[in-house]
Image (spheres, grey):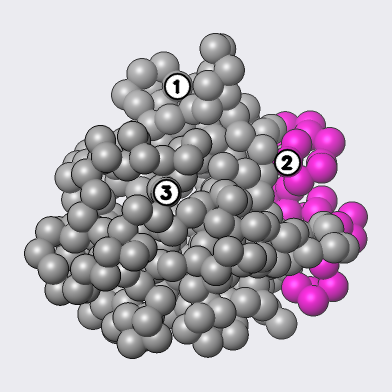
């Protein structure tokens, strides 16, 4: 089986070191296995989209020394041929199939009501029994999770699959927004299926999203996605211990580039996540180290 992975940034802010190290990690594993890399830019969040954020993605990949085999050649090429807005029919078809299965319900809860009714940070399921029609205006669509919903998936370099209790970590998550637009979970799943992605690199904060998408793949019969392997790396934090977020400040890679800083620190972090002893190797040299060290799963060779 040939490895196919993706670098999937969102143009909703300037990329930070955690984003960059995650991209390097995915790229190094792909090159070590003679796999393929897709550049997939997730731009569903049009409220936060900015052209300068889109351009930053291409500048950052060039600065990191990363190429890719499929995807847009430039910001304009992305807008013309690769934007998620061009694939909404695919996302809505998946939503239609789920609606026909009777596993979706409409929810008109406001954010305030959700905060007041939530159990921890999870949606309480308030609208489950209200039986609102799916075509009710200004309602989101949520998926009704079975109470005992356990999902499992393969984690790279682990012999035992990771198992998640989805209701406990996600609750009934949203698949269509109140404005009618598809939500991240369904769009990401459909895109990974479209490009036959079988190795997905994510931060540990997205473990619940992996579980959610695996559950959706099971409901929709997306067998290829169910066979994918995942790697959930640790998160980078700022000086206060908070997870790094996109910004225009000193933690943005844009600031590093403009200051003439080398990407060496980003490469070093990726090497650490990969279990490699870093001695200022480039990503290509890291790929050679990973391959020669027989650290890759056999089914990706």
Marks 2 and 3 in Cβ contact (< 8 Å): no
Judging from the image, what secondary structure is the residue with disc 1 in?
Answer: loop
| Residue for point 31% across, 58% down | 127
Residue 16 higher or lower than 32, as above or below: above
- The image quarter containing residue 239 is top right
Closer to us: mark 3 or mark 1?
3
Residue 120 higher or lower than 47, as above or below: above
| Residue for point 38% across, 31% down | 246
* Front in this rendered view, residue 293 or 168: 168
The numbered mark at residue 124 is 3
Query: Sequence-wise, which precedes: disc 3 or disc 1?
Result: 3
| Magenta-drawn segment | 272-301
Residue that numbered label 2 is attached to: 273
Q: Residue 232: percent from the left, percent from the top?
A: 66, 50
Q: Residue 293: percent from the left, percent from the top?
A: 89, 55
Residue 238 in sight in this render = yes
* Lateral position of residue 228 relative to residue 155, left or right: left
| Residue for point 52% across, 62% down | 212
Rate crowding at label 1 as few (under 14), some (14 to 19) or many (20 or more) other CA atoms within 10 Å. Answer: some
Determine if the magenta segment contains residue 253. Answer: no
Q: Distance between the residues labelled 2 and 3?
A: 36 Å
* Total numbered labels: 3
Query: Sequence-wise, which precedes: disc 1 or disc 2?
Result: 1
- The image quarter containing residue 203 is top right
| Residue for point 19% across, 60% down | 139
Residue that numbered label 1 is attached to: 251
* Front in this rendered view, residue 123 or 266: 123
* Lateral position of residue 123 relative to residue 162, left or right: left
Closer to us: mark 2 or mark 3?
3
Dividing the image into 4 quarters, which one contains the N terminus?
bottom right
* Front in this rendered view, residue 162 or 64: 162
């Amino acid at each position: 089986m040939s490895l196919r992975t993706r670098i999937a940034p969102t143009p909703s802010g300037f990329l930070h070191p955690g984003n960059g190290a995650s991209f390097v990690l995915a790229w190094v594993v792909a090159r070590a296995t003679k796999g393929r890399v897709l550049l997939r830019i997730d731009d569903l969040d049009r409220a936060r989209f900015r052209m300068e954020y889109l351009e930053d993605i291409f500048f950052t990949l060039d600065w990191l020394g990363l190429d890719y085999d499929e995807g847009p050649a430039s910001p304009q090429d992305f807008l013309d041929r690769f934007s998620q807005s061009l694939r909404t029919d695919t996302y809505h078809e998946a939503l239609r199939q789920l609606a026909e299965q009777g596993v979706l319900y409409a929810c008109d809860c406001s954010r305030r009501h959700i905060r007041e009714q939530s159990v921890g940070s999870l949606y309480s399921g308030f609208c489950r029994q209200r039986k609102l029609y799916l075509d009710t205006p200004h309602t989101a669509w949520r998926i009704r999770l079975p109470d005992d919903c356990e999902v499992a998936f393969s984690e790279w370099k682990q012999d035992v699959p990771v198992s998640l209790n989805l209701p406990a970590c996600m609750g009934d998550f949203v698949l269509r927004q109140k404005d009618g637009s598809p939500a991240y979970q369904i769009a990401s799943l459909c895109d990974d299926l479209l490009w036959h992605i079988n190795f997905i690199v994510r931060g540990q904060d997205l473990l619940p999203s992996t579980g959610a998408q695996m559950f959706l793949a099971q409901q929709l019969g997306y067998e290829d996605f169910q066979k994918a392997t995942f790697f959930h790396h640790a998160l980078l934090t700022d000086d206060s211990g908070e997870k790094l977020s996109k910004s225009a400040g000193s933690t943005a890679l844009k600031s590093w580039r403009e200051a003439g800083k080398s990407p060496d620190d980003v490469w070093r972090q990726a090497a650490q996540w990969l279990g490699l002893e870093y001695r200022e190797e480039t990503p290509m040299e890291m790929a050679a180290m990973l391959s020669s060290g027989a650290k890759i799963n056999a089914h990706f060779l």
